[in-house]
Image (cartoon, rainbow, N blue to C red):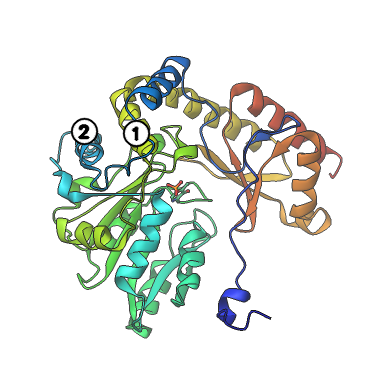
Amino acid sequence: MLEFLRSDIVDLQAYTPHPGGAVTTPLDRLDTNESPYDLPPDLQEKLAWMYQNTIETNRYPDGSHAALKAAIAQYASESAGGMVSLDPSQISVGNGSDELIRSLLIATCLNSVCSILVATPTFSMYGILAQTLGIPITSVNRHPDNFAIHLGEAEYALEQNPLIRVVFVVHPNSPTANQLTSDEINWLRQLPSQLLVVIDEAYFEFSGETLLAELEEHPNWIILRTFSKAFRLAALRVGYAIAHPQLTLALEKIRLPYNLPAFSQGAALLALENRQELLSCISTIQQERDRLYQAFQNIPQLRVWPSDANFLYLRLEDHLASRYPYPQLIADLKAQGTLIRHTGGGLRITVGTPEENSRTLERLSALLQGQL
Ligand SMILES: *Cc1c(COP(=O)(O)O)cnc(C)c1O
């Protein structure tokens, strides 16, 4: 049946988003790295007002994203500590940064014989989107102690496979939560200019680290950011790319003409205008992250890694993982009301509200105590 479908698409394992929407049983949803905090009521009211008074639902949205690009250029320039002054022509806005990743793949590797390089474990969408476009993926390992990219393997892969045209890195990485080391950054700096380097800074607001200041020296670099995490707008799907104007122009050609709904554009603008208020909960999330990290370190069945993001990466001690498989642990936790993610051979747990985090600790410790 449906023989017209590409067989690689039929065989493809899709990304499994969580069901979303209103939940009937209360669950601590700590599996997708969202902010635990919805918009404050005054901003929700402003959004409602905007919807009623400024949005013409019968009209197409602004397909140029002009106002939003200008505001993003200003915020992003600021975020590099005043070291850069970005022009709106260096910004491209997507329906989530997922759209930008797909546009980049279309702009580079589709219809031609080239491939992408990733270091696993990493964000799964690079591989999934590449597969949907029939683009081959070369995957190298990370060092098991700190999850830095195995640069020797990466160099070897580039030598062996001259068809690699795009390198994806995440700063800090998901699911392992580590930011790029200076060795990794030096390696990126010396990559030949015919390679596109995608630096995904989805968690920038939590790490405070950005490579934006070096963008001008490296026209083959592109930085991706999103409103889905620290800016608390996951429901509205807004991501952006920062790059040389000729590179953003390619993204602009590829995207759908009205890729971003008017409401999403207005909400992202409002979020930027109120960024001080919105980003003020970051210090709480960082403190909670550090509290969780310390507490997990005291659970002997667990190994936890330091985090520069709003989530923690953990693994069960080897002897335990065979007796108590991850899917079972995830299911047991879910039955108690905590949703986390099994990915990259370990557990990724989003930092939630203090109450959620305390429940995570209690539930996880109790389950593991039974397994000693
Ligand atoms: C969450 C996340 C994104 C954001 O995706 P959106 O499509 O903007 O919601 C991008 N990259 C990484 C590594 C992420 O974890």
Residue 283 x %, y %: 43, 24
Above or below for 341 versus 187: above
Of 248 and 155, the residue lying toward us = 248
Front disc: 2 or 1: 1
| The residue at label 1 has a CB less than 8 Å from ligand 1 | no
Q: Is residue 58 above or below residue 273?
A: below
Please give the label number shown on residue 78. 2
Tell me which label, 2 or 1, sits earlier in the chain: 1
Q: x, y (%) of residue 181?
A: 36, 52
Q: Quadrant of the C terminus?
A: top right
- Against 113, residue 57 (above or below) is above
Q: Position of residue 195 (x, y in %)?
A: 26, 71
Instruction: In this rendered view, identify the residue nearer to me: 107 or 298.
Output: 107
Tag 1 residue = 56
Quarter of the view holding residue 339: top right
Label 1 near label 2: C-beta < 8 Å?
A: no
State the SS at label 1.
loop
Residue sitting farthest toward the right = 370
Secondary structure, mark 2, is helix
Q: CA distance from mark 2 to mark 1?
A: 32 Å
